[in-house]
Amino acid sequence: MFPSAESWSDIDAIEKRYPMGVTARTIAVACPERHSNRLKAGLAIALVALLATSLWIGWVPISPAELDDIVRSWLGRATGETMGSKALVFGLVRIPRALVTVMVGMGLSAAGAVYQGLFRNPLVSPDILGVSAGATFGAALGLIIAGTGWLAIHSLSFVCGLAAVGMALLIARLVAVRPMLVLVLAGLVVLSVFNSSLTLLKYLSDPYNELPAIVFWIMGSMSRAQWTDLRLMAPIIGGSLVIIHVMRYKLNVLSLGDLQARSLGLNPTVYRMLFIFFSSVIVSVSVAICGQVCWVGLVMPHIARTLVGPNHEEMLPVATLLGGIFLLVADTAARSLTMAELPISVVTAFIGAPLFAYLLYRNRGSGWS
């Protein structure tokens, strides 16, 4: 699509970052910056509103009057004994759970957008290099070795997730032919290895205690989220998101190919490894905290690209906000629709799959741009 007259100011701003004007125009998006800023502001407001709303929804209803009593109980001026349990639900369960959910959703969506930009493939998701499979295997191994040991499970999950990506990168480096294609194939190899190893762990595990815990982890859930998890993941995921957003304009250059990137003075290998590393850290930490969560990193970047175009300077922040909104809505539904909490991946699949099908139908014949 050719840029509209209103968007040429955006193109000129982008051209200041690149020495070649003609090439820079192919990077720009046909979307006025003012529209993008309004959209990002609206999504941020919607996210805050949904975050506040989700704190009221659940099988333990909390009215505004009860919230006042909860605040009083926190200040040491409780007016009723019944507020003790609701104060615990509100302060120790719902608030950390909602914040963890938003952070995981934002992280997975941003990682998906980065991977799709790097590989120039709209079907790429954050687990393309096996990080999710590796992290899930590590969590299952921790459940068998340490039982409910929080530190062992999270540590093994995080380490195995990054190890999976390292294995994929090592295989791609050894082959050294068409590196991006080989990297995808290497990711499939690593994914198969860790999935097979996970199946073996499930076969060898105790069917009464360990196997249900492993299956529950694979399906994903935010029910384990605590303040401790938030303190652990906030600096890691938050810091990685900041770094990715600071470098996001370089994704525009990398998406043109290595030859174009080098002609623009960018080292594609270094920045590709940086993007892969920080995105993999986000996914690995997310799986370590809440298990596998599907569809967020695949669908949300597509929606963001539909709204603001392929320019990563505008698309990546929109995708990040959409990811937080989507997963927060899914988790609220998972814990509110039935008495027994639904696995989060079940809800995201029921929402994400039809949504993805609609996006494919809506963009039929237009390609990925």
Image: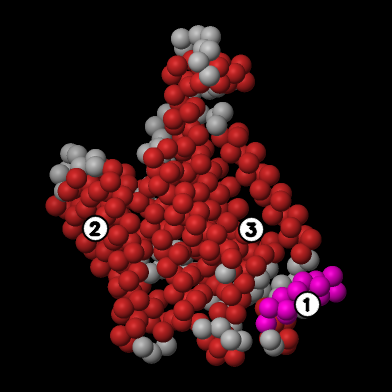
Question: On screen, 9 above or below 304?
Answer: below
Find the residue positioned furthest to the top: 80
Element under disc 1? helix
- Circles 1 and 2, Cβ within 8 Å, touching? The answer is no
> Is residue 12 located in the magenta-colored stretch of the structure?
yes
Label 3, on which residue?
318
Q: Identify the image quadrant of residue 68.
A: top right
Amino acid on which disc 3 is placed: Val
Label 1, on which residue?
12
Element under disc 3? helix
Q: Is residue 205 left or right of residue 315?
A: left
The percent position of residue 164, horizontal first and vertical second, equals 31, 67
Q: Main secondary structure of the magenta part?
A: helix
Tag in front: 1 or 3 = 1
Disc number for residue 198: 2
Q: CA distance from mark 1 to mark 2?
A: 51 Å
Q: CA distance from mark 1 to mark 3?
A: 22 Å
- Circles 1 and 3, Cβ within 8 Å, touching? The answer is no
Region rendered in magenta: 5-18
Q: CA distance from mark 2 to mark 3?
A: 35 Å
- Of labels 1 and 2, earlier in sequence is 1
Quarter of the rendering occupied by the C terminus: bottom right
Q: Is residue 54 left or right of residue 151?
A: right
Disc number for residue 31: none
Question: On screen, 86 above or below 32?
Answer: above
Residue at x-position 73% and y-position 60%: 36
- Circles 2 and 3, Cβ within 8 Å, touching? The answer is no
Tag in front: 2 or 3 = 3
